Image: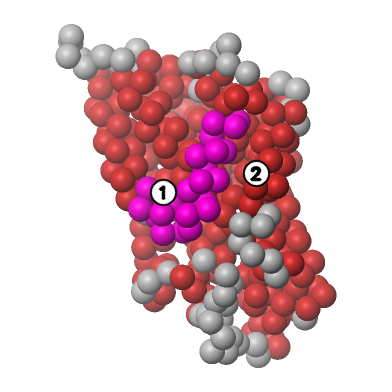
């Protein structure tokens, strides 16, 4: 269920407000539509993985396209994962500084996340997966408790009329979330290391549907409590709900518990993306895994702090610039690679993954 944590850790921050702005009271349908991008990406990854069971995307891209063009594609994916890592760290900075630690310098927040993330990355993929096994159920429990307590504050009339302006606003609002569901592309970089490759699509699909279902519930509750207009005006609407939830004198201050779990999930996500970015670099230049890890981490820390003047500029990048870059990387290039592999009759040999 690594895919669930990777997707939800950042989606829960901005998606409720971004979708409510465009799809209004029908925004809770958006995750189901947006998740189709993740399903397509997952299918492409598994199809390529079956043709090249012992190779990663950086390896079989050179087998399909030739060494020169294959390496160019690897360069693109290096950029993709580095850019994504910068966005992830800045999301952490924005959320933490706005909600709990406004006086803390952004550099301190960035360094604190990256130090833990790089340490996990240096220990390997198995350590990241074991961290996820611990955090995943805690994240689910925290969200379920939030949903249960939110139930008593809902007004279902705020969800009507459904699809007032048709399906088009829902499709338009799915553009940005689709890029996050497509993040399952990371599986293409670790496919040979996964157990039971024949079950990857089934398990990945279940993970995508679980993430979409949780996201739909989150938006559903947010709009039912605040309404679509107020939800779209908040930067972090679901957090605004969690802050004021309580159950008598016994269950209060839930946001502290959720915040700790969320930080842990962000550590997992940044670990995964730094791992993939560093792995792509090692495949490109044939160097040891840790050689580029620390310079890469330093670049991400510096860029995450100084690349965005304010949250408005960051939201523009996140909702306008990032989706096409992400979807080209998550769907466009895998489609091209699969078609080229089929037309050229390319299949992987017995070569084992090396790191």
Task: Check disc 1 and report the residue beneath it.
Answer: 4
Is residue 111 rendered magenta in the image? yes
Look at the picture and state if 239 lies above or below 139. above
Location of residue 274 in the rendering, given as x and y in whole percent from the top left corner = 59, 50
**Nearest the camera: 160 or 195?**
195
Q: Which mark is residue 236?
A: none
Q: Please state the extent of the stretch shown in magenta in the rendering.
A: 110-131
Residue 36 in view in this figure: no
Residue 120 in view in this figure: yes
Q: Secondary structure at mark 2?
A: helix
Is residue 51 rendered magenta in the image? no
Q: Is residue 260 left or right of residue 339?
A: left
Q: How far apart in space, not on screen, are marks 1 and 2 (Cα)?
A: 24 Å
Task: Check disc 2 and report the residue beneath it.
Answer: 297
Quarter of the image where the N terminus is located: bottom left
Query: Which class describes the residues within 10 Å of circle 2: few (<14), some (14-19), or many (20+)?
Result: many
Look at the picture and state if 171 lies above or below 90. below
Quarter of the image where the C terminus is located: bottom right
Q: Secondary structure at mark 1?
A: helix
């Amino acid at each position: 269920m690594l895919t669930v944590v990777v997707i939800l850790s950042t989606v829960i921050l901005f998606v409720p407000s971004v979708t409510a702005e465009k799809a209004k009271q029908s925004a809770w349908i958006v995750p189901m539509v947006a998740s189709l991008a993740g399903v397509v990406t997952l299918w492409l990854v598994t199809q390529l993985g079956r043709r090249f069971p012992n190779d990663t995307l950086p390896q079989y891209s050179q087998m399909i396209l030739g060494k020169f063009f294959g390496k160019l594609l690897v360069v693109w994916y290096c950029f993709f994962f580095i850019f994504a890592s910068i966005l992830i760290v800045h999301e952490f900075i924005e959320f933490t500084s706005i909600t709990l630690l406004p006086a803390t310098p952004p550099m301190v927040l960035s360094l604190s996340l990256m130090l833990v993330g790089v340490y996990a990355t240096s220990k390997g993929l198995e350590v990241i997966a074991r961290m996820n096994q611990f955090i995943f159920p805690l994240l689910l429990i925290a969200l379920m408790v939030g949903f249960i307590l939110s139930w008593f504050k809902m007004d279902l009339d705020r969800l009507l009329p459904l699809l007032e302006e048709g399906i088009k606003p829902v499709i338009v609002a799915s553009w940005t979330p689709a890029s996050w569901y497509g993040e399952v592309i990371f599986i293409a970089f670790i496919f040979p290391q996964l157990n039971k490759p024949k079950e990857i699509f089934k398990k990945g699909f279940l993970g995508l549907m679980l993430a979409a279902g949780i996201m739909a519930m989150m938006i559903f509750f947010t709009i039912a409590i605040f309404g679509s207009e107020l939800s779209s005006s908040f930067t972090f609407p679901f957090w605004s709900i969690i802050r004021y939830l309580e159950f008598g004198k016994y269950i209060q201050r839930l946001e502290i518990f959720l915040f700790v779990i969320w930080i842990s999930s962000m550590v997992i996500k940044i670990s995964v993306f730094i791992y993939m970015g560093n792995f792509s670099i090692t495949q490109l230049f044939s160097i040891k895994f840790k050689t580029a890890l620390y310079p890469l981490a330093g670049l991400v820390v510096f860029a995450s702090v100084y690349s965005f003047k304010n949250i408005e500029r960051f939201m523009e990048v996140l909702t306008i610039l990032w989706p096409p870059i992400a979807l080209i990387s998550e769907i466009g290039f895998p489609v091209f690679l699969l078609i080229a592999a089929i037309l050229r009759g390319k299949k992987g040999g017995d070569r084992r993954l090396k790191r």
